[in-house]
Amino acid sequence: MKVTIFSSNQPRHLNLVKEFSQIADEVFFVNEVNTVFPGQVTDFFQKSDVMKAYFSHVITSEKYIFGDIRFLPKNVRTLAIKSGDLNQLNSIQLRDAISSDLYIVFGASYIKGWLVDFLVENRAINIHMGLSPYYRGSSCNFWAMYDNNPGYVGATIHLLSKGLDSGNMLFHCVPKPIRGDTPYDFTMRAVLVAQTGLLEKVRKNEIFSMESVTQDKSQQIRYTKNNEFTDAVAQDFMSRAIKMEDTNFVYPNLLNPYFR
C-alpha cells in the first residue's frame, strides 16, 4: 500500500507519518514547514512573552506524548515546502505523491485548486482536531477547554471537502481523561487518539467502506480563526490553572466514537 500524507513538521505530525510507515510499503510526505519554536519565533503564531509561556506548556506535553522532532523511516519520501506554498505546486512536482492508495491531510494549509479537486475525487481523509460540527476552524480543542467544555475535546475523521472542516464525517475520536494529565496533556492526547483510531481503521481495511454523514452546522458552537488566539486569551487560560480532575465531562452526540 502507498500512502500520501499532507502535514506539517511538529512532533505530532511526524508521528503520524512514522505510524503509517509501519503499515505502508511507501509513504509520500508533503511536509509544510513552520517553526518548531512557536511563541519564540514569529510564524503561524506571534512572538511574545505570553505566547512563549503558553507554548512552553504545549511543547512539553507534545514531547511527553510524541517525543521530539526526528528523522523518519527509510520508506518515507519527503517533499519539504514552506507552509502556504502547497497551492503553488503543480501535478508534475507532486507526480510521485498522487498515485497512492490513501491520501491523508493533517495540519496542512487550506488546500485549493486542482489539488483539492484531485483529493476530493480520491476520497482523501482529513484529521480535524476538534469535534465537528461543534467546534470548527483553528485551535478547536483549546477553545473547547476555554469554554469549559472538556467533553468536546477530540478529533473528527472526515472526508476532505472544498470547505474548511466541512466534509462528511466518518467517526469521532475522543481521549479518556487520565489522572495527572494537565489540560495541555489532555488536548495533545486527543491528537494521539485520532492517529490511533485512523490507523486502526486503515489496518483493518474499514476506512474505505465506512458510510459518511453530513455535518449539521446548526449545532456549531464556535468557528474560530487564528487571529482570535491572542495574548489576552492565552494569559486568561493559563491563569485559570485548570485541574482535569475537577472538570465535568458532558459529551455531545458523537458519530461512531472511538474512545481511548
Image: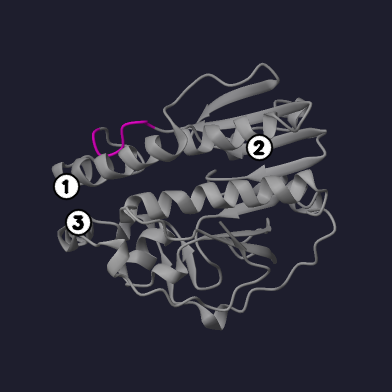
202 is within the stretch colored magenta = no
Whether residue 211 is visible to the viewer of this picture, yes or no, is yes
Q: Residue furthest top?
A: 74
Do the residues bearing badges 2 and 3 touch, measured as CB atoms within 8 Å? no
Calculate the distance from the C-alpha at mark 1 to the C-alpha at mark 3. Answer: 9 Å
In the depicted structure, whether residue 193 falls above or below residue 28? below
Q: Residue furthest bottom?
A: 218
- For badge 1, the amino acid type reads Val
Q: Nearer the viewer, residue 150 or 100?
A: 150
Q: Nearer the viewer, residue 80 or 248?
A: 248
Q: Nearer the viewer, residue 43 or 92?
A: 43
- For badge 3, the amino acid type reads Met
- Pointer 2: what residue? 5
Do the residues bearing badges 1 and 3 touch, measured as CB atoms within 8 Å? no
39 is within the stretch colored magenta = yes
Numbered tag placed on residue 50 in the rendering = 1
Quadrant of residue 19 in the image? top right
Numbered tag placed on residue 238 in the rendering = 3
Residue 229 lies left or right of residue 194; in this view the side is left
- For badge 2, the amino acid type reads Ile
Residue 205 lies left or right of residue 152; in this view the side is right
Q: Earlier in the sequence, mark 1 or mark 3?
A: 1
Crowd tier of the residue under label 2, counting other residues whose Cα lies within 10 Å: few below 14, some 14–19, many 20 or above: many
- Point out the stretch of residues depicted in magenta: 35-40
Quadrant of residue 115 in the image? top right
Q: Nearer the viewer, residue 212 or 232?
A: 212
